[in-house]
Amino acid sequence: MSVVELRVWRVGSAAPALLRMATGRRRLHGVPGLRFAKLLGTGSGRTFTPRDADPHHWALLTVWDDAAPADDFADSRLVAGWEAAARERLRVRMVPLSSRGRWSRTEPFDPTGTTSADATRGTPVAAITRARLRPARALSFWRAVPPVIDDLTAASGLRMAIGIGEAPIGLQGTFSLWDSSRHLVDFAYRSAAHRSAVERTEAAGWYAEELFARFAVLEVEGTYRGRTP
C-alpha cells in the first residue's frame, strides 16, 4: 500500500529556507522506497498569484512504496535540517483513494489496493489539486479564483486549506483537509462557484496539465498556525 506524506514547516527566516529548497532536491534522488517527491512553497491560495506567497511556511510532499521507508526518512538529513530550523511543524500521513491527471508528466498517486472509499466514511480525508497554467490563459483563471476560494473557506467540515506549488506563478495547487468524504463531496458538487469553474475548465483551456487526488488520512501530527487541523 503506497503511503503519502505532506510535511509543512514554519520557519523564522526565509533565506535559509530558500537554500534548503535548492539543496534539498538533490537529497531526494535515490532515496529507497521513494516514488515521488516535491519540495513546495506555500501560500494562502486566495488568488494563486505571487502576493499569496508565504515565505515562512514550506512543504515537502512524498509518495512511498509503503510505511517502512516513510518512517526511515523521518531520520534523514533533509528532514532533520528542516526540523531543526522549524518553529512549528505539521505532518499528515495518507493513502490515496482516487487520482486523476498528471504531475510533472507522471501519475504520482496509485490508489490500487488502498482503502476503499466506503471504508473511510465518517473519517478525515484530504484532497490535493495541482495545475500547470497556460500563460495565455492565466488572467482568465485568476479572475475565476476568488468566488471559489470564498466558498471553500466557508465550507462545512473544512479543517485546513493551503496553497502549494513549485513556483509562485504558473505551477499551483491546493492541499485541503476535511472532516469526512461527505464534506469534501458537498463542496465539490454543491458549491455553485466550484461547479462553474469545473465546467469552464475545458472550454477556457486554463491548464496544460492538471491533477486531482483524494486521500484517506491516517495520521495528523503537529500544528499549523497554532492548531492541529
Image (spheres, rainbow, N blue to C red):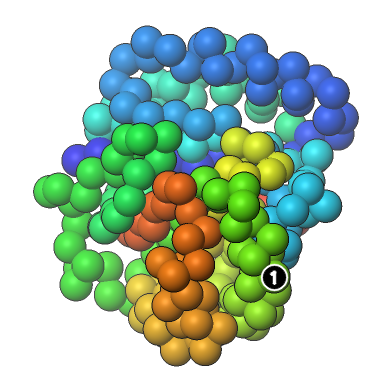
Numbered disc total: 1
Secondary structure of the residue carrying numbered label 1: helix
Residue 16 appears left or right of 60: right
Q: Inspect this view and state whether residue 177 appears.
A: no
Tell me the amino acid under the disc marked 1. Arg
Q: Position of residue 83 (x, y in %)?
A: 66, 27
Give residue 176's position: percent from left, percent from top: 53, 61
Q: Is residue 55 left or right of residue 24?
A: right
Residue 184 at least partly seen = yes
Q: On screen, 154 above or below 41?
A: below
Q: Position of residue 8 (x, y in %)?
A: 62, 41
The answer to which image quadrant residue 90 occupies is top right
Identified at 41% across, 67% down, the residue is 202
Q: Residue at x 64, y 56 (%)?
A: 138
x and y, in percent, of residue 210 in the image: 42, 52
Q: Quadrant of the C terminus?
A: bottom right
Q: Is residue 18 left or right of residue 204?
A: right
Of all residues, the one furthest to the front in this rendering is 136
Q: Is residue 114 left or right of residue 134?
A: left
208 shown above or below 40: below
Q: Front-most of 62 and 226?
A: 62
Question: Around disc 1, counting alpha carbons within 10 Å, would you say few (fewer than 14), some (14 to 19), or many (20 or more)?
Answer: few
Please state which of residues 115 and 173 is positioned toward the viewer in this rendering. Answer: 173
Location of the N terminus by quadrant is top left
For label 1, the residue is: 143
Which quadrant of the structure image shows residue 213?
A: bottom left
Residue at 52% across, 59% down: 206
Q: Which residue is more in the foreground, 81 or 198?
A: 198
Residue at 74%, 32% (x, y): give it: 86
